[in-house]
Image (cartoon, helix red, strand yellow):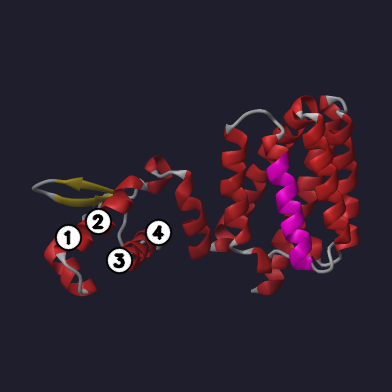
Amino acid sequence: MVDAVADSLRREILSGRYAPGQYLPPARELAERYDVTRTSLKHALMRLVESGLLEIRHGVGTLVLDYERQGGLDLLPMLVAANAPAWARSIFEVRAEVGALIAVRAARNATDAQRRRLAALAARLREATDADAAQLAECDWHRELARATGNRVYPLLMNVVLDTYLRQRHALRGPFLDPAAAADRLEPLAKAVEEGAAAEVVHARAAKYLEETGRMMIESMGGAR
């Protein structure tokens, strides 16, 4: 019940029903609307406080915050679920810019074992039998790439981007409808990372791959609407 109330309020805030600077209705009214106890409502509100959506002002009320200023990355999947087309370009821009940096660091820092795992994941993409398997293999390649940087923050950041993307993956299958072609697109970047190529080479190949596949995903999203 707490989950349902938190999800409903979150959707209403992200959709703009409750705007930043506005106070939510009184706790008694919300509890009656959702048919929950005041205790359950309090737990639901605290989840949104932790996400940066609300601030509880004792004796005043529950204030809606500006999530773009005070929210965290945990909101990203919910924002995309609420309005995927509006967020797609921003997400793919971040994917391309951050992904190129990750690739450069991975090419420089990856261990031999990590390079072998990356090669195996690239082969799994080529051997995929359908778009869904190809998508998942490519995502696993990116997760391993982030781990190969040696920086523990990059895998966490990549997890947020990929988990957001995977929730919408059936609308983003364009680059993976032909797994062999998807593998061909990844191969120049994958080889550069595996071989530890120069930073400028890796960066250029990563930017090309990520921008091209991002464009294809946005186009496939348009076709899915």
> Disc 3 or disc 1, which is closer to the eye?
1
Q: Residue at x 19, y 67 (%)?
A: 30
Q: Which label belongs to residue 39?
A: 1
* Type of the residue with mark 1: Thr
Q: Secondary structure at mark 3?
A: helix
Secondary structure of residue under mark 1: helix
Q: Against 101, is 19 above or below?
A: below
Compare marks 3 and 1 and give the one earlier in the sequence.
3
In the shown orientation, is residue 49 left or right of residue 204? left
Query: Residue shown at 35%/59% (left/top)?
Result: 13
The C terminus, quarter of image: bottom right
Q: Quadrant of the N terminus?
A: bottom left
Return the residue at label 2.
43
> Which residues are the magenta region?
131-144
Closest to the observer, 169 or 209: 169
- Mark 3 / mark 4, whichever is N-terminal: 3
Q: Which residue is mark 3?
A: 5
Give the foreground label among 2 and 4.
2
Q: Is residue 68 left or right of residue 151?
A: left
Cα separation, mark 3 vs mark 4, equals 14 Å
